Structure formats: C-alpha cells, structure tokens
Amino acid sequence: MSDIFRDSTLGAILNYATNGRLFPHPEQRPEWQLPDNLRPKEHSRDSDVKNRDKVAVVTAGSVTPTSRGSGELEKGAAAAPAAADDKLVVGWYDDNDQENPMNWSLTKRCFVVAMTCLLTTSVYTGSGIYTASIPEIMEKFDCNQTTATAGLSLYVIAYGIGPMFLSPISEIPSVGRREIYIITLIIFVALQVPTLYANNIHTLLAMRFLAGFFGSPALASGGATIQDMFHFIKLPYPMMLWSVTALCGPLLGPIMGGYAAAANGWKWPIYELLWLTGFTLIVLIFWYPETNAETILLRRAKRIRARTGIEGLYSEGEVRQSHLKSTQVLYDSLLRPFQLMTEPVILYLNLYISLGYAIFYLWFEAFPVVYVDIYHFRLGSSGLPFLGLLFTAILTGICYLIYNKRVIEATFLRTGAIIPESRLTIALFAAPFGPIALFMFGWTARENIHWMVPTIGAALFLPGLLLIFQGAVVYLPMSYPRYAASILAGNGMFRAVLGGAFPLFGRSLYTSLGVGGGCSLLAGITIAFWPGLWYLWRYGAKIRAKSKYANF
C-alpha cells in the first residue's frame, strides 16, 4: 500500500522535490532499463520485432489503454491510438503492470473506493445539514421561508452545473482526476469560512452556491474514478456502494445539523461541515492516488524522457491532448448534453429520475411539517426519522448486489451479452415503491397515528428511487455508449435543477394542500410515468434502432 502514498498529492510533491529519490516510480529506480522497443530506431535490435507483442510499451499503431470508456476492457485495453507514426508510444510494461488501475490489488481498489465514498458523503452532507439552520437564518437575516430555503436549493443546483465545466477537465490527460478533487475540495473548505461570517442573506446564498459548484466533482466524477479500476461486469458492486453513500450524506445531514443548531445556533451545522470536509481533505492529500490511466501514462512518459533524454517518447493521451481544441471541449461539455436531450428516451428518463430526486429533496421540507408541527419533535430529534430512509437505502443496496450477482452477472456468463432493456427490469419492479411511500406518509401523518407509521412510509421511497436510478444510469450508457459522458452529465444537471427547485415551494405545497393532498399530487405525477417505463422496456430496441445516436 506504500504506492498509494507515493501516488497521493503529498507523495507526488515529495517525489518531485527530491527528483525521484523519495517514493520512486519504476522508471526512477537505478536498476530500471529502457525497453528495447523504446530505443530510437538506429539503436533498435532485430529482436525487437519478435518481442513487440510481448510488451505494452509499444510503438505507434499498437494498443494502449485509455482511462475509461463504455466498452472498456479489463487490463486497460482500448481503441487504437492516434499517435503519429514517427513517435514511440509509452504504454503499460506488460499485462500485469501494477501501475495500471485495473491491475491494482483488490485491497487497494477497495481502499480508493472507500476514499471516494468518504469524499462524496462529506460534500453531499452539505445539502441536508443546512436545513436545520433555516429557522434561525430566517430570524437572523429577517427573510422569509423561501429565501432561507434557497441556501439548500442553490447548493443542489450548483453541484449539477459544476460538472458541466469541471468534469471534462478531469478527462484531460495532463490534469487527471486527483488534482481536480484536491483543488476543488480546498476551495470548498475555504468557502465555509465566509459562509460562517456572512453578514447578510445575499452573501450567505452566494457562498452556498459556490460551495455546491466546487464540491460537484466528487458527485460527478466519482463514478468515473470507480470505472477506472473495475471491469464492467464487476462495476455494479462498487458503484452501488458509492451510490448508497452518496444518499447517506443528505440523510445524515439533518441528523448532524439538527442537534448542533438546537444547541449552538445556525452556524454550528456549517462548522460541522467545515470539520468533516477539512478532515476529508487531509486524508485525501495523504492517501488518494490518480486513477485516470491516460494521466498515469503521460506522467510515465515524462519520467522516461527525463531519465533517457529521448524526446520522441509520448503517451497516447499526450499525443491526443496536443490535438485537443478548447472549442471541442466546450462543445462536448456544454452543448452536446442539451443536444442529446432531444432524444425521447433520454428526455423521458431524465425527467423520471429528476422527479424522484426532486421528491427526495422535498422530504427536507415535509419532515419539519410532520414531525415538528404535528408530532411536536424538537429541532434536534426532528432529523431522526431520516434514519429510516438511511436503513432502507443500505438494505436496497445489499439486495441489488445480490440481484446483480444471481441474475445479471449469471446471464452474462451464460450468454456472453446483456441486452440494455434487461437493466430496466429492476426499475419496473421498483416503480410502485414511490407512490406507495407517498400515499402512506401523506395520509398517516396525523396526531392520532403513531409517528413510526409515516416514518415507515417515507422509508419505502428510497428503494424505488435507488433502483430506478441504477436501472436508468446503466441503461443509458449501454444504449448510447459513444455519448455516455454527455448523457450522464446532462442527467446530473437535470436532477440537480429539479431537486433544487422543489424545496422552494415545498412548504407552500404542504400548507395549501395538506400533507396528504401534497403527497397524493406527487404520487399521481409519479404514476403517470409508469407507462413510459414499461413501453421502453418492451420496445426499447426498436426505438434505439431509429436513433442516430444509439449504436448498441
């Protein structure tokens, strides 16, 4: 595990400062020798031709791995490179090269997944933890409920907008994922200070928006980081763990913030967020490695050039980056996601998933109405019912992994292929959970019914949300593999905008229609989406056949 520290931010700084004497890479060790096939042609031996297929550090025209892709193969194999014929392309030394994230030990990969989950949970906690501060913020800054709630909404909306700009940067080989995580997290932690000392509501809301924006890489690129390390058939296991921990953040936020705000005022939930993310930042600086294969190979190429003085050695990503135009990056990150939303399938699933997330964030408005106004919970204990949602989220994750092992993975091993529409089967099963949860929560939330009954109802919402999300976000990249990144970026923005907007009118919804009426309205809208899901499951292949974007 010492190589994790070597590849961390601090390890990289020490390695650079000592010119490779501390925590050296293989190319920096005294015994390392330049492979024969990377020597200039005039010094190459005839035997190079015989050995060329045995090494993964190859001349132009050979296969070298990219960081990820929808059709990614284990050991990092990827499409043919775009290197020029007169350049020597630096790749993996062999199929078992331990610097290839696909070849890392299971222990190391699980450790990196755990660090990614810690980062995601820490930042995601920032949404829900704020809700406990809303009552005192209204009093402190003399603003209404909607204005104070905007601190939650702007945070959520911002971490949907942020990935449109920041995620494409993490795909640039010379940048990678680690730097984006660390730099944006430093800014995120620093922004909590002016948030704490804001002297008016406008400053507070601006800081909340900026914090959400700079915290967004954890939520958008965490999945890409995990994809860097796992073969697609095993990918659902760490991805589900990451998804569950992403939901744990907003659910833990009101519990952590409720008691802090009740005891010490509105600032203390923000202090908790500062401490949590500050701790996470320190841990990541010491122990978070780079996972983007193109970035790892680019740095290897630089080390080999420095060691040998041969300037004609490049990584494939380095060559590709030299031809990368900023206008193309801008198009891919900002315009293409909107262009793809004109696809009926993509638009429908974006709306359906976004509706689920919007209702999820409405719980932060519904719970105070039910547990404070009806059941007379105190501010601190009013967040405890979120533990019910947390429990069902974890239970759903475990059940999904069992389903994936016994059904999806078994089908693939038996047939060698998975039809995209088969990933929607679990979503069809999960669809009724949302309306059932809303009806049960809405119509049992009354003083003559024990508070555990609506809590159980609310807890049933998470299985529906989580399984529909899992089915859809796997189905979309399988159906549109060439545009997977753009589709998922657009989906994330869709979710964030709707999820951030709904809490703004949540209190008015439940006040005007009552808790039962408001939940029934939301349940009815959810039910209206069911036929589309069944139609897509039944006729999705025919729909994809007519699409100019789908190429599965």
Image (tube, grey):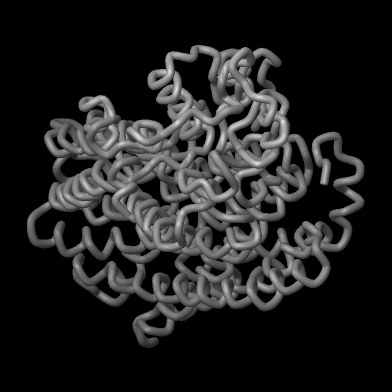
The residue nearer to you, when weighing 417 against 200, is 417
Figure label count:
0
Q: Which residue is drawn at 17% across and 32% down?
A: 194
Quarter residue 162 falls in:
top left
Q: Is residue 103 above or below residue 497?
A: below
Check the image and name the residue furthest to the front.
Answer: 46
Can residue 137 be seen in the rendering of this structure?
Answer: no
Q: In this view, does 319 lie above or below 57?
A: above
- Left or right: where 548 falls relative to 172: right
- Left or right: where 370 falls relative to 57: left
Quarter residue 10 falls in:
top left
Check the image and name the residue furthest to the left.
Answer: 264
The residue nearer to you, when weighing 487 against 362, is 487
Q: Which residue is drawn at 70% across and 31% down?
A: 62
List x then y, in percent, for residue 65: 61, 38
List x then y, in percent, for residue 3: 33, 47
The residue nearer to you, when weighing 550 against 266, is 550
Q: In this view, does 190 lie above or below 43?
A: below
List x then y, in percent, for residue 9: 29, 36
List x then y, in percent, for residue 305: 44, 19
Q: Which residue is drawn at 46% across and 44% down?
A: 99
The residue nearer to you, when weighing 438 against 550, is 550
Can residue 345 be seen in the rendering of this structure?
Answer: yes
**The N terminus sits in image quarter:** bottom left
